[in-house]
Amino acid sequence: MIRVLLADDHSIVRGGLVRIVEESGDMTVAAEAADGREAIRKAGESRPDVAVIDISMPGPDGLEVLSQLRAYYPEIPVLMLTMHGEEQYVVKALEAGAMGYVTKKAAPEQLVTAIRKVHSGSRYLTPEISEMLADRLARGAKGGSLLDTLSARELQVLKLLAQGNTNREIASMYNISIKTVDTYRFRLLKKLNLRNNAEISRFAIQNRLIEA
């Protein structure tokens, strides 16, 4: 049996993932985690065969969890499961050592296959993500955008600000201080050469991070 760690801060989503894994026939859930710190701790306690990590979690986000798992438990392959299908998230996850990347939209059909694949030592990307990365390579590194300069958390804050969330609301979502959100916002404005939240929203729409 393939022992799987599932880390997602939404209990309903996590419950669905548990059901998918347990019904596979050759997998079992070794541990569950609702935030980044718990994911790291549970990985050390249960030593799963595969860790499935959501990129957007309170505390250390998925990429930070991935980095720590790669440092302390390099034998555990990590599969990123996320709502973010944007190019920048995928690239940052793969550069950080993820063995696979599956969007939550594709999870019901592809999660079991993805877990088996990374457990065998291979990488797994959905066809849509593979095509997106191929397009990126065709453009060449020079064809990237300012989004490539942002961290995963900065991308998350960018989207939330663009959607109209306040700093207080964002702080509550990620269990961080309002001052930390202020710092992220300042960095975003500086890196992207923007002046205010209205320009952040316009930038996010232009780069297809959110819908108009």
Image (cartoon, grey):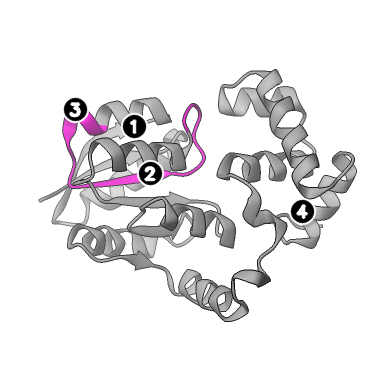
- Kindly check if marks 1 and 2 are in contact, taking CB atoms under 8 A apart as contact: yes
Q: Which of marks 4 and 2 is nearer the N terminus?
A: 2
Q: How crowded is mark 2: few (under 14 residues within 10 Å), some or many (20 or more)?
A: many
Q: Residue furthest bottom?
A: 138
Q: Residue 6, position in %: x, y?
A: 32, 41
Q: Give the range drawn in magenta.
A: 43-60
Question: Considering the numbered disc 1 on the image, is that residue within a helix, a strand or a loop?
Answer: helix
User: What kind of residue is marked 1?
Assistant: Ala
**Most foreground residue, 177 or 22:** 177
Residue 100 lies within the magenta run:
no
Residue under label 3, please give it. 45
Residue under label 1, please give it. 39
Residue appearing at x 45%, y 43% in the figure: 63
Give the vertical position of 138 relative to 11 (above or below): below
**Most foreground residue, 147 or 160:** 147
Question: Considering the numbered disc 4 on the image, is that residue within a helix, a strand or a loop?
Answer: helix
Quadrant position of residue 47:
top left
Residue under label 2, please give it. 53
Q: How far apart are marks 4 and 3 (CA)?
A: 40 Å
Q: Distance between the residues labelled 1 and 3?
A: 10 Å
User: What kind of residue is marked 3?
Assistant: Glu
Q: How far apart are marks 1 and 2 (CA)?
A: 8 Å
Q: Earlier in the sequence, mark 1 or mark 4?
A: 1
Question: Considering the numbered disc 3 on the image, is that residue within a helix, a strand or a loop?
Answer: helix
Question: Considering the numbered disc 2 on the image, is that residue within a helix, a strand or a loop?
Answer: strand
- Kindly check if marks 3 and 2 are in contact, taking CB atoms under 8 A apart as contact: no
Q: Which of marks 1 and 3 is nearer the N terminus?
A: 1
Residue under label 4, please give it. 204
Q: Which of marks 4 and 3 is nearer the N terminus?
A: 3
Left or right, residue 38 beside residue 148: left
